[in-house]
Image (cartoon, rainbow, N blue to C red):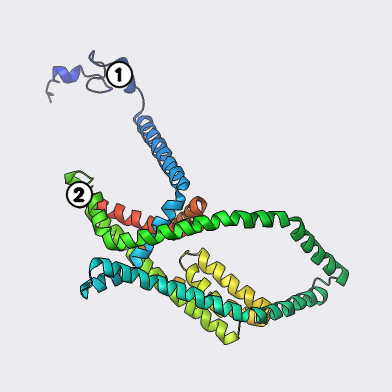
Amino acid sequence: MPTAPMPEAAASEPPGGPRAAGGGESPARRADYHIPVALRVSAGWSWRLIVTGAAIYILLMVVGRVRIVVIPLIAGLLIAALIHPLAHRLQRLGMNRLGAAFTALFVFFAVFVGAGVAVGFNAANEIPTVSDQVSEGVEQIRGYLRNGPLHLSQSQIDNLVDDIRKSLANNRGRLVSGVISGASVAAEVLTGLLVTLFSTFFFLYDGDRIWNWIVTRFPDGAEERVRGAGREAWNTLTGYIRGTVFVAAVDAIGITIGLVGVGVPLVAPLALLTFFGGFVPIVGATVAGAAAVLVTLVSNGVPDALIILGVVLAVQQVEGHLLQPLVMRRAVRLHPLAIVIALSAGGVLAGIPGAIAAVPFAAMVNRVAGYLAVSGK
């Protein structure tokens, strides 16, 4: 069967491409055709990833330098997301924007400060009882060391106590310097509280206008997508903070019921610690539960400590298998490995505040990325 004649241009085309041997191309361009496609693609990805990583690293370094401003701004945004429904409800009842923002902020800080004062009074009233119970607990520990599996002698126990005292005495200078440096930390905390207060108010009072100004900085064709991405991010943040408050409150109530039933002192501080620990996923609940068990062990002994340990484990199981899937999964939509990585990165960069903000930030990025992917951009 005769075949059609090959066109002259196609017959003379070099195997490397339509213009691989053309005289109009530079030697470097012709040399690229001899590099395997996989290597060219890998090199392109590599230098782009290096540039992106360097940009992210520089941005994180800048954020770390000004963290005294960035952390309060993030805290203000989280608080605004929590109390924004109250301000919106007050506006619907007829209150103007300024009055609604002031009232919502006042209610939040009144509740926050009131809880702190109540916990402080409770702790002050129970400190004498706790001191006596701690002394009894120390004696029980000494008896366990003498009569338990270790069978330590009294002289060995005394030497251990002396070593602890000497260690504290030798590090007294470090403790004093730590107290002195704590004064500067207190000044930074006060500054951060003021920035948080002002940022929360303006997020409540002028948040929509601030966001509109940001959106108008983008090109006209991208404004709608940016506005939609911001809406998705805000819904994710509000859903996360509300769900976290609900889960933390349930954890605190469950631990409080167990502590009251056993008769452990310092119930209010432990309940407050459990509530705030709920804002640090995975780690916070573990630390708060360990504190509750430790206080119970020192004050009430081993049997009650085992009971509180069971209560803590039961509460955490309810949180992990019931509350988190029902309340938080829709807002967060993150794999547990992603949550752990976000927590670790946030803790390394900014300590506890970074760990608190890491998960909602990662959830917002994930939701925005999904929104832009669905929109085809």
Local SS, label 2: helix
Q: Which residue is mark 1?
A: 30
| Near-viewer residue (42 or 135) | 135
Where residue 155 appears, x then y in whole percent?
88, 69
Which of the 4 image quarters holds residue 138?
Answer: bottom right
- As shown in the figure, which amino acid type bears the numbered disc 2? Glu
| Near-viewer residue (283 or 270) | 270
Q: Is residue 20 above or below residue 260?
A: above
Where residue 44 appears, x then y in whole percent?
36, 32
Residue located 84% across and 68% down the image:
158
Residue located 26% across and 51% down the image:
372
Where residue 283 appears, x then y in whole percent?
52, 64
Q: For residue 223, which numbered disc appears in the image?
A: 2
Measure how far apart labels 2 and 1 are at the Cα level: 42 Å
Which of the 4 image quarters holds residue 220?
Answer: top left
Q: Is residue 10 left or right of residue 169?
A: left
Q: Is residue 54 above or below residue 79?
A: above
Q: Is residue 179 left or right of residue 255?
A: right
